Structures are given as C-alpha cells and as structure tokens.
Image (spheres, helix red, strand yellow):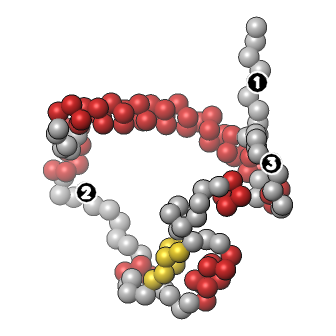
Amino acid sequence: MSTPAPSTLAIVDAEPLPRQDEVLTDAALAFVAELHRRFTPRRDELLARRAERRAEIARTSTLDFLPETAAIRADDSWKVAPAPAALNDRRVEITGPTDRKMTINALNSGARVWLADFEDASAPTWENVV
C-alpha cells in the first residue's frame, strides 16, 4: 500500500475565522508546510536530546556547560555583533499585547522601542494567533 504524497499546503483543521484568508493564503500555508517537512526531523531530535539532558541533570544534580562548547568559551575573539544604536537607549520602551487597541497606543506613545508581546500578553488561542 503506497503512502499518499504530502500536501503542498498545511491543512487548517479549525473553524474558519473572519478574514483568515488574508493571513492564511495558499503561499503562507505552503511555506508552513515546507518548514514542517524540512525541520520536523531536526526539531524532534533536539527535543529528544533536551529530554535526555534534563534526565541527566536530574540524575547527577550537575548543571554545567557542555564539553563540546569549551572551544567557544576559550576563544577570546568570539563575540556577538553589537546591538543596533536604536536599541542602546532603552530608557523609554513599552511592552504589551498585540491586540489592535494596545498596538495603536504603543505606536502613538512616543516610546523609542515597542516590544510586541505575542506570548505572555496574548492567550495563544487560534483566533488570537490568526
């Protein structure tokens, strides 16, 4: 028995929402499907390694850097790129949810930086995400 070819689009298995077709276009769904096909094996591998590492830490009560990263820590020339100038002055910033009213308020606030909080300030319901 042959396996059906994978869909070129991600399948939305949820009640339709008003205007969702503006966000969940065929191109967007094809992109998500390709991301899933390409990265799921590696993601599963990393999640398994995370579980193994968590079990090891629980078993040994030792939390330390991984030995395979020692060369990076010993290399004084290794450093990350500097932060953009616009982010160096964070005295005036606002963090908040991404609903319409709060987004407008944030953009009109005069704050130099707005951290759009898609996680803690927005319940990850299907309607909120779409």
Is 36 on the left or on the right of 120, as rendered? right
Label of residue 78 in the image: 2
Q: Are marks 1 and 3 in contact (CB under 8 Å)?
A: no
Disc 2 marks a residue whose amino acid type is: Trp
How crowded pointer 1 is (Cα within 10 Å; few <14, some 14-19, many 20+) is rated as few
Q: Looking at the image, which residue is at 25% across and 57% down?
A: 78
Q: Looking at the image, which residue is at 76% across and 32% down?
A: 7
Secondary element type, mark 2: loop
Disc 3 marks a residue whose amino acid type is: Glu
Horizontal and vertical percent position of residue 76: 17, 57
In this rendering, the answer to whether 56 lies above or below 65 is: above
Rounded to the nearest whole Å, what is the CA distance between mark 2 and mark 3?
49 Å
Q: Looking at the image, which residue is at 63% across and 34% down?
A: 37
Residue on which disc 3 sits: 15
Name the N-terminal-most of marks 2 and 1.
1
Seen from this angle, which residue lies furthest bottom?
110
Label of residue 125 in the image: none
Residue on which disc 1 sits: 5
Name the N-terminal-most of marks 2 and 3.
3
